[in-house]
Amino acid sequence: MESKKTVGEIIDELYNLWQVHSTNWPNDNNPSHLEFELRGFNPNSNEQIQLVAELCYIVQSGAWETSYSALKKMLPDQDFEFTTLGEIKNYFSGRDYSSDEETLREFIKNQRNPFILELISHVMLKSIENKEALDPFSLSLQGIHYMHLSSKKQGLDLAAIAKDNSNEQYYLVIGESKNRKSPSEGTAEALGAFKEYDSGKKWPDIRQVMRTVANSFESVEGQLSASISKHILWKQKVIYRLTIEHRSKRPKKGSQFREFGNSTPNVRHTKFRQCEAISTKRLDDFYESVSQKVVSFIESKERELNSYA
């Protein structure tokens, strides 16, 4: 699994392999939101499993940058420590929760698998820079907040800042990822959260996170961090992203996300409501394959380190 690819190269490769296609729902004339389809996503592809596993290792090792340009250039950390390797291996194998099958299943379902889906949602952030899908906007990612290492942590699943290259305006990106047993339950939960964000009720929390992101890339003279103050100034400059699992490509009534518009009335443009339902027979096999790949890689590094001891 060890490679010389940068994080940016891994993300680009995955996004290209997934053959991301966009559609205005319900139609181009009167759209509500922008839906993305991962036409090339293959849960059985060893290449895709390996690339996702590499990103999982990088994030769980604590090697993450909030400046997007720095993140894209970052190489995987080559300084391995037994403690870190052991913690990551235990996380993906579930060893710390293997005292009984029920506990292990709960950990895999409620912590490990949601972490991998959240990582996929971060790769899909590249859709922000998809010029064809986002026309007439020309956006580029500037900063991304740290990923949650545990799904039990409260807060935004995804937070980023993008810049419109045509007019130097900035937009806040807020994302949710859900892998509930019932896809509609996950969607309703995420849209309920978006409704609160859109109303300004959670603005102090959002402001705090976004200032951290802004500080990672703006110059000392920059005023973006300071300007993220009142909700009224930013409420029409927020992009919402939602990633869920789904068992069918055609949910009832045509879209799993049909209430997106009603939940986010302050959104300035329909293309600022973005979503994808990854339509597989659940992702359990994919999650397990990714986790096994991470564990196998770490075991090989442990053997290597032991040979030098």
Image (spheres, rainbow, N blue to C red):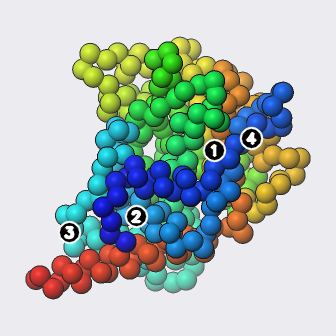
Q: Amino acid at mark 2?
A: Glu
Please identify, in this view, whether the residue under mark 4 or under mark 1 is nearer the observer. Answer: 4
Q: Position of residue 53 (x, y in %)?
A: 44, 66
Measured Cα–Cα span from mark 4 to mark 1: 15 Å
Crowd band around label 2 with a 10 angstrom C-alpha radius: few (<14), some (14–19), many (20+): many
- Residue 259: horizontal and vertical position, in percent? 78, 37
Q: Earlier in the sequence, mark 3 or mark 4?
A: 4
Element type where label 1 sits in the image: strand
Circle 2 residue: 54
The kind of residue on which mark 3 rests is: Glu
Viewed as shown, does residue 127 lie left or right of 95?
Answer: right
Marks 3 and 4: which is nearer the front?
Answer: 4
Disc number for residue 23? 4
- Measure the C-alpha gap from mark 2 to mark 1: 23 Å
Up-down relation of residue 186 to residue 202 (above or below):
below
Residue 242 tag number: 1
- Whether label 3 touches label 4, CB < 8 Å: no
Q: Residue at x 83, y 37 (%)?
A: 26
Examine the image and state in which quarter residue 88 appears.
bottom left
The residue that label 3 is drawn on is 81
Q: For the residue marked with disc 4, what is the amino acid? A: Thr
